[in-house]
Amino acid sequence: MRDAPAADDVASGVVALAASGDVRARGQSVARYHADMTRVCVVICAGDADLAEDAVQSAWPIVWRKLGTLRDPGHLRSWLLTVAANEARQLLRQRRRGAVVEIDVADVGSSHGDPSDAIRSVDLRAAVRRLDPQDRLLLALRYVAGFDSSELGRAMGLSPSGVRSRLERLIARLRTELDDD
């Protein structure tokens, strides 16, 4: 009886096939990772879903071009998320010149709950939008993509302890900004 292939062997095979242009392997990769890439980019793009989708769409050709350079197929997910995050930051830099701020208008007279119920959420979104894109990237990779400090360190060029202290300072800063007292 033959043993099932190890997960690393399967990942290596899919990466090798996708790198060689195999349409099915590329389709599997897109199906598996596109949503994760989009979620991370939405945070980096301060909630702009259209810009985030543009970033992910522009990341895929880069992925296909550079996939053969990926040394460890076990790090495929973190590598893909990092490529998408870099594209999101690039698009933000390009669009920063003529940014338009959109203001949500309360739906007066509807059956929805009291708008004051959402103030805390609005305040948090506003505070996150004011962060540097690099700080939003750190938050997105940690709390949206679920990266641990080792993965974050690899993705951001920091040590795991450096990542933890940077996250701690960032969260303290957000808490201070959101403090109602």
Image (spheres, rainbow, N blue to C red):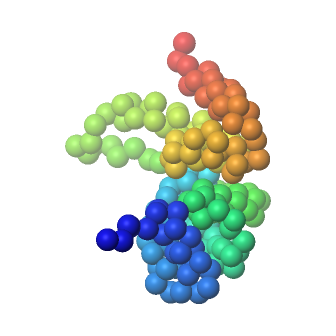
Left/right placement of residue 85 relative to residue 26 reads: right
Residue at figure coordinates x 28%, y 37% from the top left: 113
> 101 or 88, which lies in front?
88
Q: Please say if 126 is above or below 92.
A: above
> 99 or 40, which lies in front?
40
> 13 or 85, which lies in front?
13
User: Residue 107: where, in percent of width, then height?
Assistant: 35, 46
> 136 or 113, which lies in front?
136
Q: Quadrant of residue 60?
A: bottom right
User: Residue 136: where, in percent of width, then height?
Assistant: 64, 45
* Quadrant occupied by the C terminus: top right
Residue, far left: 111
Q: Please say if 68 is above or below 75.
A: below
User: Residue 177: where, in percent of width, then height?
Assistant: 62, 25
Residue, far top: 181
Residue at figure coordinates x 69%, y 79% from the top left: 65
Q: How many marks?
A: 0
Residue at figure coordinates x 52%, y 33% from the top left: 123
**Could you tell me if residue 139 is visible in this image?**
yes
* Quadrant occupied by the N terminus: bottom left
**Could you tell me if residue 95 is visible in this image?**
no
User: Residue 115: where, in percent of width, then height?
Assistant: 37, 35
Residue at figure coordinates x 36%, y 71% from the top left: 2
